[in-house]
Amino acid sequence: MRRFILLLLFVVTTFVQAAEDAGALVPLRQGVALYTSRDYTGASQIFSRDAANLTSTTVGDNRTTSVRVAPGCRVRLFENPGFKGAHLELAQDTPTLKGRAVNVNQASSLQVRCGRAPFPDELAASRTAATSDRSSAQRSDGSAATTTSDRSAKTAAKPGSATPALPATGVTLYTERGYKGISRNVRNAVPDLSATEVGNNRARSIQVASGCYV
């Protein structure tokens, strides 16, 4: 009987220890967990949102020693309250903070992000990049329009050339044959040419840009 009781105690103790060990390996389902001792031991608390000051938490201020992070989440530990001072970003379980940017017993505030949610500085950088891209695109469009306009003007300003290049857009009227004389590039309908450089009943030759017709 005594041997049976001893064997039963051994089995129960082994089972409890195995359960505790298995529980320690189960990953978090959300947020992050801070521990006051290394290897995920000691007082602990799970955080799923930012904490500007750890003083009133279970872990407390300047007591964090190890950290567990749920899959797909990130945490930033700051050495001062209010998310200030040096910070350390973690995306996986860390059994000890020794030697890190925010060392053992130094964390005073934290930020938590899961999924694709950005940290404040990442969001600001993303907005700045988007604004810069839009500005660059607008400058490129403006430069292209200016280049096309300048090219058209230069083409129309060559009355003495034997065969001017085709206009970039629209049509170009000339007062002489062979694309010579006074010229005018036209891009829209003109009901009366008398007020133009070419004038009424004076057009003798015409060039049409590719894709246009008159």
Image (spheres, rainbow, N blue to C red):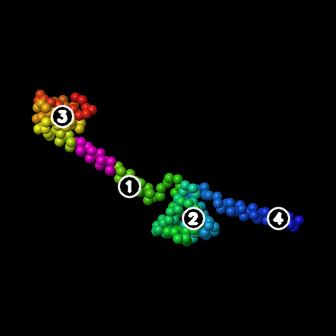
**Can you identify the residue that label 3 sits on?**
172
Do callouts 1 and 2 mark residues in contact (Cβ within 8 Å)? no
All told, the count of numbered labels is 4
Rendering quarter of residue 128 = bottom left
Q: Which residues are magenta?
A: 135-149
Kindly report the secondary structure that dominates the magenta region of the rendered protein.
Answer: helix
Question: Does residue 147 belong to the magenta stretch?
Answer: yes
* 180 vs 65: above or below: above
Kind of residue at badge 3: Thr
Residue 214 percent coordinates (x, y): 22, 29
**Label 4: how many Cα within 10 Å (few below 14, some 14–19, many 20+):** few
Q: Which residue is mark 1?
A: 128
**Which residue is disc 4 drawn over?**
7
Contact check, label 3 and label 1, Cβ < 8 Å: no
> SS for tag 2?
loop
- Tell me the quarter of the picture where residue 97 sits: bottom right
- Comparing 148 with 186, the one in front is 148
* Residue drawn at the location 55% of the way across and 67% of the way down: 54
Mark 2 to mark 4 CA distance (whole Å): 38 Å
Q: Earlier in the sequence, mark 4 or mark 3?
A: 4
Identify the residue at image location x=25%, y=33%. Answer: 210
Q: Position of residue 154 (x, y in %)?
A: 17, 42
**Front-lying residue, 38 or 50:** 38
Check disc 4 and give the amino acid type: Leu
Q: CA distance from mark 3 to mark 1?
A: 44 Å
**How far across and how far down the image is residue 68, in percent?**
58, 62
Q: Residue at x 55, y 70 (%)?
A: 98
Q: Which mark is residue 94?
A: 2
Mark 2: amino acid: Thr
